[in-house]
Image (cartoon, rainbow, N blue to C red):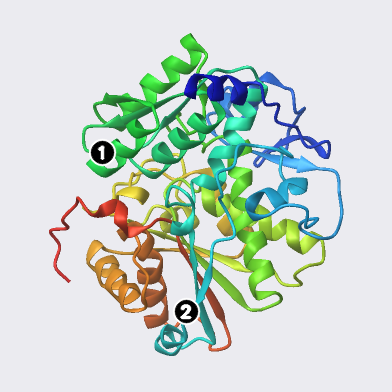
């Protein structure tokens, strides 16, 4: 019976959005047609890469209706007219709650604070918004296997969505992967390939993409460019939902736990889209929260391609020593900023959110830690509204014991 279900799922056709005209390079603005094979190699813009600059691509569309959705469906799928695929695998992602936290607003000295709880997605993180669209692209290109380099959320999410669509899934990780995430990945039938270190992980994934034709969903370049551009489009829906949930509210700042900038880039594309449609009159500023001064230093003029060592930390979901052009672009265009936080500060913020009834992964709590640090430095206006993006649920860390004391 299960075999028959799988066979039926693989006959599904995922419809490309007819408004999708192609993809552009963020840096040189070169344009690519939707069926250009370079879009599916996982290497971003070939021109910039040849010059030594790994840069991701972004979808471009013909203008459509002014509204964000036509009301015909629910959750993330209702935004499909503004996404690269009008249909894609879905298991209930999107429409996550925006929780009002008035006590935190008073404490931070701002007008309002809202917590966007992405931990309420099906596999417990924001990655679910990316997986369905990446799977749709892989399926439409005739691929039978998707692959991602992940130590947690992305792997668990992609494994679930690949299983739903009847595709094979390989997650390339390291021996330090949490048993909780390892179990989730293997539960959905994905293969877990363990490698030694980040460079080895990316190198192995690139080799499998080039030799076996596996479809890449996450980055494998070093220096990195970013994840699959069709998948990143899914993160626009976070911005769309925020626009719907709080309407016109300015000034607005959105704090995003950031590693290589997939989510902060996607959120920026969504806000720009809403602004162009006249749904908001003022664009928010985006604030990247990170465990070390990577983007802070890039914004100060350092080369984004150079690895910048960070202090020891336990913020595993936003770790690493590299930045990307897409995250730099989102911060620069939004007139935003980056702030680095310590594990100790994130642990304290995690307890603060717990006292408000919210249990989030430590890396998610870093967003509040960033807000507290900036408030202490008088970086917010008293009439400002803050959105704190909680990217992942805390139950995923139940098997880990943090050795840092608050």
Is residue 260 among the parts visible in the rendering?
yes
Q: CA distance from mark 1 to mark 2?
A: 36 Å
Residue at the location (37% across, 57% down)? 393
| 324 displayed left or right of 294 | right
Label 2: how many Cα within 10 Å (few below 14, some 14–19, many 20+): few
According to the picture, the residue beneath numbered tag 2 turns out to be 379
Query: Which is more foreground, mark 1 or mark 2?
Result: 1
Residue at the location (50% across, 86% down)? 110
235 versus 172 height, above or below: below
According to the picture, the residue beneath numbered tag 1 turns out to be 177
- Viewer-closest of 76 and 308: 76
| 250 displayed left or right of 319 | right
Residue at the location (68% across, 67% down)? 243
Residue 122 picture location, percent across and down? 47, 49
| Quadrant containing the C terminus in the rendered view | bottom left
Is residue 45 among the parts visible in the rendering?
no
């Amino acid at each position: 019976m299960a075999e028959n279900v799988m066979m039926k799922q693989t006959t599904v056709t995922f419809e490309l959005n007819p408004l999708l005209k192609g993809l552009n390079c963020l840096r040189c603005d070169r344009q690519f047609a939707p069926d250009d094979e370079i879009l599916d190699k996982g290497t971003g813009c070939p021109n910039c890469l040849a010059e030594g600059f790994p840069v991701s691509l972004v979808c471009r569309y013909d203008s459509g209706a002014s509204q964000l959705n036509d009301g015909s469906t629910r959750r993330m799928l209702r935004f499909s007219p503004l996404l690269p695929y009008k249909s894609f695998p879905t298991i209930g992602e999107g429409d996550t709650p925006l929780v009002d936290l008035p006590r935190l607003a008073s404490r931070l000295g701002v007008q309002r604070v809202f917590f966007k709880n992405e931990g309420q997605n099906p596999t417990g993180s924001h990655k679910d918004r990316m997986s369905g669209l990446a799977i749709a692209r892989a399926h439409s290109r005739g691929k039978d296997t998707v692959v991602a380099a992940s130590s947690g959320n992305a792997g668990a999410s992609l494994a679930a969505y690949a299983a739903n669509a009847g595709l094979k899934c390989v997650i390339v990780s390291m021996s330090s992967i949490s048993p909780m995430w390892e179990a989730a990945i293997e539960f959905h039938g994905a293969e877990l390939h363990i490698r030694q270190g980040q460079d080895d992980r990316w190198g192995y994934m690139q080799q499998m993409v080039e030799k076996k034709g596996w479809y890449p969903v996450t980055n494998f370049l070093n220096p990195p460019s970013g994840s699959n551009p069709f998948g990143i489009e899914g993160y626009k829906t976070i911005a769309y939902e925020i626009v719907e949930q709080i309407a016109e509210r300015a000034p607005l700042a959105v704090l995003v736990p950031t590693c290589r900038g997939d989510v902060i880039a996607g959120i920026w594309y969504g806000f720009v889209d809403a602004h162009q449609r006249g749904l908001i009159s003022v664009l928010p500023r985006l604030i990247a929260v990170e465990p070390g001064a990577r983007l802070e230093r890039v914004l100060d003029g350092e080369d984004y391609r150079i690895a910048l060592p960070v202090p020891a930390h336990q913020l595993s979901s936003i770790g690493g020593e590299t930045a990307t052009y897409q995250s730099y672009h989102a911060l620069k265009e939004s007139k935003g900023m980056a702030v680095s936080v310590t594990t100790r500060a994130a642990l304290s913020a995690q307890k603060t959110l717990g006292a408000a009834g919210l249990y989030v992964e430590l890396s998610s709590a870093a967003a509040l830690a960033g807000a507290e640090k900036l408030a202490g430095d008088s970086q917010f206006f008293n009439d400002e509204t803050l959105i704190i993006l909680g990217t992942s649920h805390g139950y995923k860390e139940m098997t880990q014991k943090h050795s840092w004391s608050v």
